[in-house]
Amino acid sequence: MAYSSDEIIKREILDTLGHETNGIKLRIFPQSSNEDQKPFSEGGLTFGFEGVSYGSCDAAWYVDEQWIDGLNGKEINKKPVIALEGTDALSRNSAGNALYQRFHHALGGVKNGIVGVYYLKKGTQKIQPDLYGMAYFASKVEKGKYLITDDLSVVKDLLECYHDPVAFSAYVDAYLEKMHELFITKFNAAYGGDWEKFAEQRSTIIQNGYVIKYAGRMRRNFTDGSQRAGHIAVGEMFLTKYYFYDKKFYYLFPKMTHKDLEVLDHSKTTDKEWFLLRNEPNVEIKTMDDISGLDKECRDALLSIQDTPLKGDAMRTFNKCMKTIVEGFKSGKLKLK
């Protein structure tokens, strides 16, 4: 019988680390259980901050100390120290932004001051260096630290030195620097170390004090469950937010209107990805209605492909419009309201 990705990861965690390491206990549930959907303070594996849930993790290690859950403000006598999200995606032909899609699960722990670990079990693919950069920069601005690894011995090392705060902090800091080296090596090779070149190739506009990331999303991308656009959009959102952590981030969907956002806000009230997109601090979704100075010809062209997938003529129309829009923002002719 073929095991799911979750089951493979959970079995490996138990086989490698057992239920307790160095007096630090493991919380983990069978794949068939829904207990992980509950907040950690209520016996689950979901972490969040100020009412915003970032998704459930596969495992968490805790000690018997007082802790206040940042998701709901509850105080309990179990303090999580590591929150882990795992995937077998590297053995399932997943690459590119597909690997970003679960980044936010462990991020909930990081926002609570916990060490978050995104564990990608070794496979035929390699970890995208972008992930190292996302987690490294997130560790600069969030309360906790975020580590990316394909080796569970990293978690074992963390558990074994946890009770020595100096050693634990030194280990985390050294690992973060290793992650940064892996990221910057790829960044220099791909973009010559130039953020403007990165922006040009990654649908991003860098301005003084803010950054715009644009994507050809349409309303149906978020209402048709088969498209998984919400997962992809969230992953790209966190990549841009943390790469440019010192700037305001505007996520621009130029094929959409305010009406589209209103419809999605009304119909997606229980959708976790849409909720994150609309509530992540320092991130705002913008549409064509928010582009001050956009000429009628460009607006009409975007409206003509509003509900059309981006391929063929629709892609050519979109690219033509975006060239005009990007040039407009750079010259100051266009601004965001």
Image (cartoon, grey):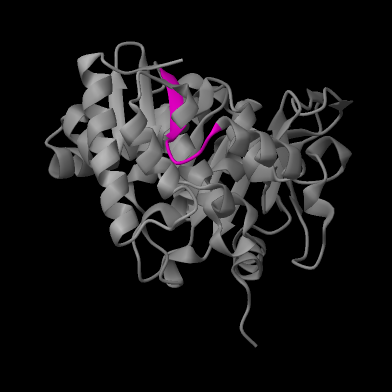
Residue 249 location in percent, x, y? 44, 23
Picture layout, residue 59 above or below residue 114:
below
- Classify residue 96 as left or right of residue 231: left
The answer to which quarter of the image holds residue 47 is: top right
- Classify residue 224 as left or right of residue 101: right
- Classify residue 72 as left or right of residue 278: right
Residue 196 location in percent, x, y? 19, 28
Q: Residue drawn at (76%, 29%), measured in percent from left and top? A: 71
Q: Residue drawn at (59%, 50%), measured in percent from left and top? A: 222
In this rendered view, identify the residue nearer to me: 226 or 303: 303
- The question of residue 222 being in magenta is answered with no
Is residue 142 something one can see in this rendering? yes
Residue 21 location in percent, x, y? 67, 48
Which residues are drawn in magenta?
A: 248-257
Residue 317 location in percent, x, y? 29, 48
Q: Residue drawn at (21%, 44%), measured in percent from left and top? A: 186
Q: Residue drawn at (48%, 26%), measured in percent from left and top? A: 289
In this rendered view, identify the residue nearer to me: 171 or 151: 151
The answer to which quarter of the image holds residue 181 is: top left
Quadrant for the N terminus, please.
bottom right
Residue at the far bottom: name it: 1
The majority secondary structure of the magenta stretch comes to strand
